């Protein structure tokens, strides 16, 4: 797989995590000003539209989506989706660092397990070295 595909995936992962941080910060600011449940929806919409954090988060998530589409045109879905899921690990780190959220040991263990799965999937995208076996799935295409 070309290096540019990995670079696009990395940028997409960080754009998604940063977008989530901005959205979370924006929504927490809005919720601190006015209740989100049973409140005036027009006032809430106005706050959403006027929040720079919501705009930044939305723009970053649009960038993520465009990069995701680009990567899907270059790589297999069964490779791209697990790799994109490393975004969970980045989100945990970003939430702890940028939002000062407490991140428990159990969350970090979960993030490490996800990372391990991502590494296994990424290795599956490499060309066979002769030590891997070719598995045929009935009714499908084999590896």
Image (tube, helix red, strand yellow):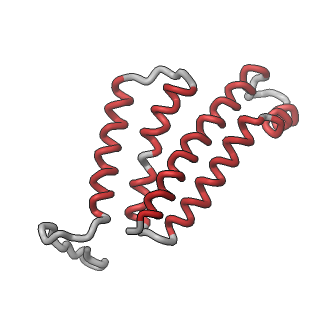
Residue 100, quarter of picture: top right
Q: Is residue 73 above or below residue 117?
A: below
Report x, y in % for residue 32: 73, 20
Q: Is residue 67 left or right of residue 134?
A: right
Q: Is residue 143 left or right of residue 102?
A: left
Q: Is residue 99 above or below residue 68?
A: above
Report x, y in % for residue 30: 75, 27
Image point (72%, 38%), residue name: 54
Q: Quadrant of the C terminus?
A: bottom left
Image point (57%, 25%), residue name: 99
Q: Is residue 131 above or below residue 93?
A: below
Image point (50%, 49%), residue name: 13
**Which of 74/88 is in front?**
74
Q: Quadrant of the N terminus?
A: bottom left
Image point (85%, 30%), residue name: 40
Report x, y in % for residue 23: 66, 37
């Amino acid at each position: 797989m070309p290096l540019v595909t990995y670079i696009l995936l990395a940028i997409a992962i960080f754009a998604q995590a940063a977008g989530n941080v901005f959205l979370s910060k924006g929504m927490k600011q809005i919720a601190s000003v006015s209740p989100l449940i049973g409140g005036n929806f027009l006032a809430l919409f106005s706050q959403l539209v006027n929040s720079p954090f919501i705009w930044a988060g939305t723009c970053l998530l649009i960038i993520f989506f465009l990069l995701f589409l680009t990567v899907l045109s270059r790589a297999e879905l069964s490779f791209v989706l697990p790799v994109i899921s490393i975004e969970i690990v980045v989100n945990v780190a970003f939430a702890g660092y940028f939002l000062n959220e407490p991140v428990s040991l159990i969350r970090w263990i979960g993030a490490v397990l996800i990372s391990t799965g991502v590494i296994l999937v990424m290795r599956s995208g490499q060309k066979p070295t002769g030590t891997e076996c070719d598995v045929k799935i009935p009714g499908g295409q084999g590896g």
